[in-house]
Image: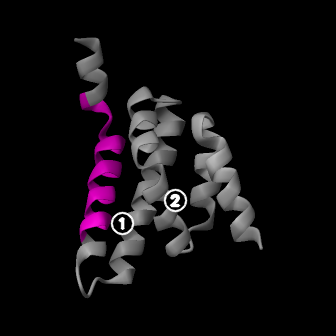
Amino acid sequence: MEKIKLIKNNEYLRIVRFSFYECMEKLNEENYSSKELKELTSSILINLKLIHNKLGYDKNTLKFIDTFQKEIVELFIMLEINDGVKFLYNFDDKNKSYYEKHLLINEN
């Protein structure tokens, strides 16, 4: 019951998921709005930071990131949301080397 409550109460992760899936859908459209895509991707980062600040290292959030790490990083890079990859590097220890590789590429 406690686990269900925690998942249900993590509104930030619900927003992250919604924003992420909206981004994926927009990318499949022929004429997507890059402004709208950037807003959705910024929402992903803002809510990931809120999760970290309010819940710490939430297991469900880390599972979501682990599943879609490549797509999330590609969005951050494509839309020049520079602190996105840096945040993931500090938040997700499991995939640190993947993020580090992209941090080095973006610095050059």
Instruction: Find the magenta span and give its range.
Output: 8-25
Q: Is residue 21 above or below residue 90?
A: below
Crowding at mark 2 (Cα within 10 Å: few <14, some 14-19, many 20+): many
Q: What residue lies at 52% left-to-right and 59% top-to-bottom? A: 73
State the quadrant of the N terminus.
top left
Callout 2: SS = helix
Q: CA distance from mark 1 to mark 2?
A: 14 Å
- Nearer-the-camera pick, 66 or 9: 66
Q: What residue lies at 42% left-to-right and 73% top-to-bottom? A: 38
The three-letter amino acid code for the residue at tag 1 is Leu
Residue 5 placement (x, y as % from top left) = 25, 21
Q: What residue lies at 60% left-to-right and 57% top-to-bottom? A: 85
Determine which residue is flagged by label 2: 73
The three-letter amino acid code for the residue at tag 2 is Val
Among numbered discs 1 and 2, the one appearing first in the sequence = 1
Res 84 quadrant in image:
bottom right
- Nearest to viewer (mark 1 / mark 2): 2
Residue 7 placement (x, y as % from top left) = 29, 28
Left or right: residue 1 versus residue 90 is left
- Magenta region, main secondary structure: helix
Left or right: residue 62 versus residue 94 is left
Determine which residue is flagged by label 1: 40
Callout 1: SS = helix
Q: What residue lies at 52% left-to-right and 30% top-to-bottom? A: 57
Left or right: residue 99 versus residue 56 is right
Res 93 quadrant in image:
top right
Which residue occupies the extreme right position in the image?
Answer: 108
